[in-house]
Amino acid sequence: MKSQRILSIICFALFLATFPACSRWRTPELSVVTATNPLDADKSEIRELINIEGKPSGYQRTTIKKTTTDGGEEAYQVSQETVVIANRLSEKMTGRIEATALQKRDGTFLKGQKTLQLDKNPMITLFVPDQSRTKLDRLASTVVIDPKTGGETPTSDVANRSIAWQNGTAGHFALYFSLWNNPLQPEEKRSVSYFDLLFEQNVSVELSAGRISPFLLNGSEIYLLLVKAVTNYQTQSGKNSLTWQFWMDAKGNMVRTVSQKPQEIEWTLSPESKVNAALKNAGNLNLSLYAIVPVQGKIPQPRETKRVAFLLQYVGADDKQSMPSGFAEKIPSTAFQTVKAENVAAWTVAITGSSPQILSDLYGSVIPPAEKETSTPGDLARNEWIQSDDAAVTGLANIATEKNFPFWDVATDIEKFVHEKMRRVNYDSSLKSAGEAAKTLTGDSAAHAVLLAALARAKNIPSRIVAGLVYTNTSTGEGVLVLHFWTELFIDEHWRPFDATLGRGGADASRIVLARSNLADQSISSLIAPLLPLVGHLQTIVIKAE
């Protein structure tokens, strides 16, 4: 009996060897989706449809053009435009990010530019290595566009600074170049480091290729290589990472890319006709759902609370690897917030209100019983987000208050001024700089926060921007925490929260600080981006409120 089984196995093996057409029993070959390598063509274009939560939400267009440098060297001009269409609080909004870089074929960065546009006036940042090749000169500005004529006025809000630089560093599209020059092989591991124009820092991507497997693209089955990727970068709170994956064809093209949950964002190579057809239904994605954390328990009068203790839980993940390591350590402890780990996925966050009345009621003094904190020169200096020397900003600062001291009085005056003068409209303009907010006096909580920060610096008070969660009761009476921005001002050797959106003369206790920055070396978008995957996995219990 055993010999018959062995013989049947041998016959089966010979059968497969005789009929190689039975390819499903062998390792399949990678398919070719785009026949031409983009680096071999004089000019090529790649179009991708963006789906978020399975809904058409935008597109990404990448153009690659072969060119030469001023010195006659071969180079490539690569431009990638990403457009997302969604709604936020029932208002339709369109966001556009464009990254452009001049690179050599080996990926070496020569110069670059990024454009961020969420309203009429795009913010443009240039990156050019200086002559010594030891630093990267950075020039940021806002292009003001006339709403009636569409004409551009001279750039304003210019801000310069330098970034440490090493000659020969790869540019923004180095990962693409690495795959196009040398496509990954099954089971191969690779690391690619480069200067990222969006993060404005050197990042590294760790690639781990799997096996070739069937993939359904536009109704046809093809064979692609699955690759898992981890992008590592720095924030002011420490190291951070983004996990994603993509499917690659034989030419090194990323045919489909999927980000880490909970956003479920995917990019898929698609013909222009399919992209245009899909975008006719774009805009149905509700971004507000990503900014809400459910709460068990209620705070009857949240704006009057003196102390609140929340149990913050990380839930909804299928596996513990989905929870970022060191998450609790990334929630800052401040003079008004303490964080205690209860277990690997739950933390108690205790908050104290900061208004003079609350502090006097609790401690008999406006000085909190906490260790003294410190500020840095960057907390007082102007940058492209907080233009404290802008004429419109300084003008408003002098209108808001004639006082220069004591800082408590100055701070409450300018918080009240921003609260009363700004109109909370136009969510398309959520990433306005302080200079723009001072001119239009419109915007959401982010615009309120940066304008208050700029007015404070104009009055010689150091300031920071805070991204966090604030408690509110919905129209149905349920309590939720929503993503929100406010400002911290350095007064009496402590960082004290002020909220110009609410205008209460300080901040109540029903809020959780998740991240804070003086925006000296990052944008509001980069401050909030690492928080979005976390917010989708959080839920909260009100332990105590008084």
Image (cartoon, rainbow, N blue to C red):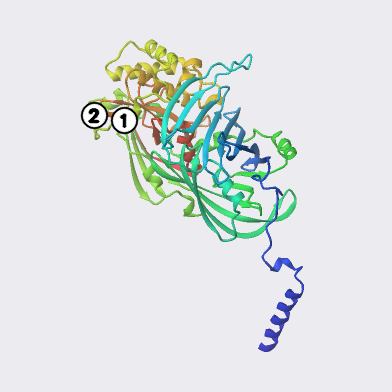
Q: Which circle marks residue 343 in the picture?
A: none
Identified by mark 1, the residue type is Thr
Q: Which residue, given by chain and number where applicable, does mark 2 sit on?
A: 363
Label located before the other in sequence (1 or 2): 2
For the question of whether residue 511 can be seen, the reply is: no
Q: Residue at x 57, y 57 (%)?
A: 209
| Residue 371 position within the rendered picture, expressed as x and y whole percent measured from the top left | 24, 35
The disc labelled 2 sits on which kind of residue? Tyr
Res 335 seen here: yes
Q: Nearer the viewer, residue 26 or 544?
A: 26
Which residue occupies 32% across, 20% down?
460
In the rendered image, residue 334, in percent from the top left (x then y), is placed at 32, 35
Q: Is residue 48 found left or right of 462 in the rendered image?
A: right
Residue mark closest to the camera, 1 vs 2: 1
Number of labels in the image equals 2
User: Would you name the residue on which mark 1 appears?
Assistant: 376
Q: Is residue 154 left or right of residue 459?
A: right
Q: Is residue 257 above or below residue 514?
A: below
Q: Residues within 10 Å of mark 1 (few under 14, many from 20)?
A: few
Question: How many C-alpha atoms fall within 10 Å of the one at disc 2: few (<14), some, or many (≥20)?
Answer: few
For residue 39, what is the image quadrant? Answer: top right
Q: In the structure shown, which secondary structural element does the residue marked by tag 1 occupy?
A: loop
- Residue drawn at the location 38% of the way across and 19% of the way down: 455
Which image quadrant is residue 491 in?
top left
Instruction: Name above or below for residue 274 compared with residue 317.
Output: above
Task: Answer with left or right where residue 142 lies relative to residue 308.
Answer: right
